[in-house]
Amino acid sequence: MFQHILDSREIFLEDFAKKSNIALSTLGMYITGELDIARMRQATAERFIGTLGITDKEAWKLFHIPLPQQRSFRTFRPKPWGHGEDSRNLIELELKSPLHGEWTVPAGHIVQIDPDSTLEGIVITELDDGRLFALPAQLAAGRGRVMGQLVGALAAFKEK
């Protein structure tokens, strides 16, 4: 399933390894079944699920994570993305143009941003010309207005 997700999103395993900070060899073992995704350590699961850009519950369904393993196969991102504290300051921003950088999100999708977190993780930075980039927080300083930490991305569905 993991390889299928990467293929459907046109993500190379090497790129996923780099963004998630999970060893390429380890990811390969998850793909082949040599390692069980459901038994992933919590810190690894945090990076794995976060890099996929999906909620914990979506990850449980996609990877058929049994109830006992859900206690460690989860993140502590703010709800509803993970199992962290509910952050009432999250901003949902519909992208008028694509998001570039460490994460790429097409125009028309929604990104969720935590404006209270600007010093860690991947942050959304608005350049002077209005383009948005997702950059590691340490690289974003001085490159534009840091809007906050990227929490996730959602497809925007509009009713007709």
Image (cartoon, rainbow, N blue to C red):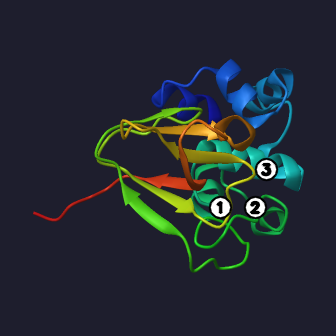
Query: Label 3: which residue?
Result: 45
Residue placed at 58% from the left, 64% from the top? Answer: 115
- Frontmost residue, 116 versus 45: 116
Labels 1 and 3 touching (C-beta < 8 A): no
Q: Is any part of residue 40 visible from this angle?
A: no
Residue placed at 61% from the left, 47% from the top? Answer: 123
Q: Is any part of residue 10 visible from this angle?
A: yes
Secondary structure under the numbered disc 3 in the rendered image: helix
Q: Amino acid at mark 3?
A: Ala
Q: Earlier in the sequence, mark 2 or mark 1?
A: 1
Q: Position of residue 92 (x, y in %)?
A: 43, 64
Determine which of the numbered discs, if any, sits on residue 40 in the image: none
For the C terminus, which image quadrant? bottom left
- Frontmost residue, 54 versus 89: 89
Q: Earlier in the sequence, mark 3 or mark 2?
A: 3
Secondary structure under the numbered disc 1 in the rendered image: helix
Q: Position of residue 156 (x, y in %)?
A: 31, 56
Labels 3 and 2 touching (C-beta < 8 A): yes
Q: Position of residue 121 (x, y in %)?
A: 72, 48
Labels 2 and 1 touching (C-beta < 8 A): yes
Q: Amino acid at mark 1?
A: Asp
Query: Label 1: which residue?
Result: 56
Q: Residues within 10 Å of mark 2 (few under 14, many from 20)?
A: many
Residue lying at the far left of the rendered structure: 160
Query: Label 2: which residue?
Result: 74
Query: Separation of disc 2 and disc 1 at Cα?
Result: 6 Å
